[in-house]
Image (cartoon, rainbow, N blue to C red):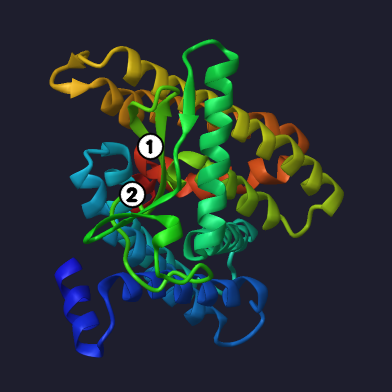
Amino acid sequence: MGALVGSIAGAIGVTEFTLGLSFCWFGAILLGVGFHLRDRAYAPYSSAVGWSLLGLFFYLQSSHFVEISDPILVAMTAGALPAGIALGVWEVRNWETAPESLVWLRGAVVWSVIPYYTVYSIPVLNMAFVSFTANSTEWLLEFAGLGSYEVGLMRVDLPEGEVLASQWEGSKWFLTEPLGENGFFVPLNHSDGTPVSVSFILACSGLQSMIIFVGAIFALGSVPWKRRARALLIVLPTIHVLNVFRNAGIVWLSDTYVEWSLLGIGMFDFTHSYAAKFASLFAMFLMAIALFDLLPELHKHILKILKPIMDIVSGKGAKSSS
């Protein structure tokens, strides 16, 4: 699939990066049409194409997560394309009787994808989130007495090498060229100037977790804004604080136990790709449970969306179709 997208990009004269990002934007816009203009005749087809394009975009990211050995994100991105196509088919077939929970899911995805990729696509915002995350983590490490560190200068990882952000010639207002694996990043150093083996990128900011809750809460159209705003005021600071503790833990463990390994997995890969991922998912699960008391509508929608999957797992789907 990646080779096919690359061939199409070459044929129309754009980079594979630009074409992939356009799948994301067009998919989100088309799905947004299905959410905000659901009374229009073309809305079901708009939603179906939107689901498929977003599924394709996330599916194309799976090769990157294979390269960096992140099994959780490999599984999540690889399943995005079949899931997107399945949701698109479900939309077209059941538009007239679309459950309220499916409408909520459209809005939740739209208002998760658009804010995140707005930050990602606007370098000045991207760098601001990275810098804020790095400085917050450095402050916590210093406050907890876990070492003396300093945040380095913002850098840009390009395919041809790294450069200081101040020397980068790209647009600061819209990302028009592919970046390297680290994108915009800030290195962390000891106070004596020696480098630490950990740098901060946008993925370290916890923005993905925040945006998931923002989309899910924003899409609750039947809930008064006062309750939605209260939920956001609870969720966003909590995720940021937990994420700073996560980052500080990864830095300290990776910097302290440099030679540690388990089955060939170093401390950084173990803490970042395994321990921290599971801890983050568990924390998000607990936070969702806490929100259900304030927003029972959110609980109802999630249960209804998961019901077909749970029926298949329990065997009910197979019994009913036999």
Tag on residue 318? none
| Residue 95 appears in the rendering | yes
Residue 23 image-quadrant placement: bottom left
Residue occupying the point 26% across, 73% down: 16
Secondary-structure class at tag 1? strand
Residue 118 image-quadrant placement: bottom right
Mark 2 and mark 1 in contact (Cβ < 8 Å)? yes
Residue occupying the point 57% across, 51% down: 128
Query: What percent of the width, then of the height, locates residue 101?
Result: 61, 56
Q: Is residue 235 left or right of residue 314?
A: right
Tag on residue 182? 2
The amino acid at mark 1 is: Ser
Residue occupying the point 55% across, 60% down: 124
Task: Tell me the CA gap for discs 1 and 2.
Answer: 9 Å
Of 135 and 282, the residue lying toward us: 135
| Residue 1 appears in the rendering | no
Mark 1 or mark 2: whose residue is earlier in sequence = 2
Q: How many marks?
A: 2
The amino acid at mark 2 is: Asn
Of 142 and 212, the residue lying toward us: 142
Residue located beneath label 1 in the image: 199
Query: What percent of the width, then of the height, locates residue 157?
Result: 32, 54
Q: Is residue 96 above or below residue 246?
A: below
Query: What percent of the width, then of the height, locates residue 134?
Result: 51, 36
